[in-house]
């Protein structure tokens, strides 16, 4: 299938260097709208059930749906002034970081939570070690190259927030590979992945600039793939504090639980004593039944005849 049949909803306006929706195309601007991949002019198909841009039939563009959403997203980052950073979830930590946290949380629980409540207590704990928040973007750089001891790495979007660089890697079908993750870790830059595939699927290709902007700004589009060790260490201590607080909050429940456990033990002891008390009587009952059976057997009465 020719590339000219792919329907694109957004184009790049050469003069203003801004993105533009197909719905905002006019006779005045329609000749200045290009694909940033090949720099060729897009054809604006406005009288259509789904208005869209497309390449000319003789286009040599090597782009596709995936490279398209990549460059549109990069351009969008140049236009937004702030965005939401997601929570760091325990699942986002490296194996080492997660094991360390888990070990210490388990220790606290083992020491302070009644054994029968430990599983539920742990399950009910929050799954994030930091909170989400809206941050101003101070600076933005696209396609920035860095040198690491594992080789060079090109970062799609480098934002500056609170005077610190934060990397953003949009992905479509293939997620950020381990080598890139290791390079990012060597650079010690906090790094987020943005899932563009789920966006495109959600809107079934019929999205506009606003949809994509809102998605990119929202924390729901991103997850952390790297955070500096120092920061994780700080959040780890805060999380352990939170667990201790939760234990304190549930002290009354734990006390009540322990009272009930004590009551169970008391009742079980009582049942045991009562059983011992009636054992001689029970033995006599069994003995008498045994005798009845023998006598009946002697005189030919079988129980099944009753
Ligand atoms: Zn193109």
Image: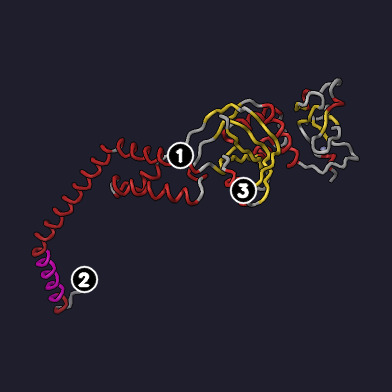
**Disc nearer the start of the sequence (1/2):** 1
Regarding mark 1 in the picture, which secondary structure is present there? loop
Magenta-highlighted residues: 282-295
Nearest the eye: 151 or 226:
151
- Distance between the Cα atoms at labels 1 and 2? 71 Å
- Name the side, left or right, on which 86 lies relative to 1: left
**Disc nearer the start of the sequence (3/1):** 1
As drawn, 179 above or below 164: below
Give the labeled residue for mark 1: 129
**Disc nearer the start of the sequence (3/2):** 3
Give the labeled residue for mark 2: 303
- Distance between the Cα atoms at labels 3 and 1? 24 Å
Query: Is residue 289 magenta-colored?
Result: yes
Give the labeled residue for mark 3: 183
Task: Confirm if mark 2 falls within 8 A of ligand 1.
Answer: no
The chosen color scheme is secondary structure
- Distance between the Cα atoms at labels 3 and 2? 85 Å
Identify the residue at the far bottom of this view: 298
Regarding mark 3 in the picture, which secondary structure is present there? helix
Q: Tell me residue 276's x, y (percent).
A: 11, 61
């Amino acid at each position: 299938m020719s590339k000219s049949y792919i329907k694109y909803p957004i184009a790049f306006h050469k003069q203003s260097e801004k993105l533009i929706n197909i719905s905002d195309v006019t006779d005045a601007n329609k000749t200045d709208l290009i694909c940033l991949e090949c720099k060729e002019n897009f054809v604006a198909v406005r009288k259509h059930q789904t208005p869209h841009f497309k390449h000319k039939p003789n286009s040599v563009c090597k782009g596709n749906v995936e490279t398209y959403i990549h460059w549109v997203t990069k351009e969008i980052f140049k236009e937004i002034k702030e965005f939401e950073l997601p929570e760091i979830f325990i699942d986002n930590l490296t194996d080492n970081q997660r094991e360390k946290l888990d070990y210490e949380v388990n220790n606290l629980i083992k020491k302070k939570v009644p054994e029968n409540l430990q599983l539920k207590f742990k399950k009910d704990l929050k799954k994030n070690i930091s909170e989400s928040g809206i941050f101003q973007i101070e600076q933005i750089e696209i396609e920035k190259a860095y040198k690491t001891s594992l080789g060079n790495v090109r970062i799609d979007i480098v934002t500056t927030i609170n005077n610190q660089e934060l990397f953003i890697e949009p992905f479509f079908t293939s997620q950020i590979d381990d080598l890139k993750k290791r390079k990012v870790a060597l650079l010690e830059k906090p790094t987020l992945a943005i899932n563009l595939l789920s966006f495109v699927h959600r809107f079934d290709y019929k999205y506009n600039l606003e949809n994509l902007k809102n998605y990119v700004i929202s924390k729901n589009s991103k997850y952390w793939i790297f955070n500096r060790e120092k920061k994780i260490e700080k959040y780890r201590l805060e999380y352990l504090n939170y667990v201790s607080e939760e234990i304190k909050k549930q002290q009354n429940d734990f006390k009540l639980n322990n009272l009930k456990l004590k009551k169970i033990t008391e009742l079980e002891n009582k049942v045991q004593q009562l059983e011992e008390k009636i054992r001689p009587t029970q033995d006599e009952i069994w003995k008498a039944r045994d005798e009845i059976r023998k006598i009946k057997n002697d005189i030919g009465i079988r129980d099944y005849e009753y």
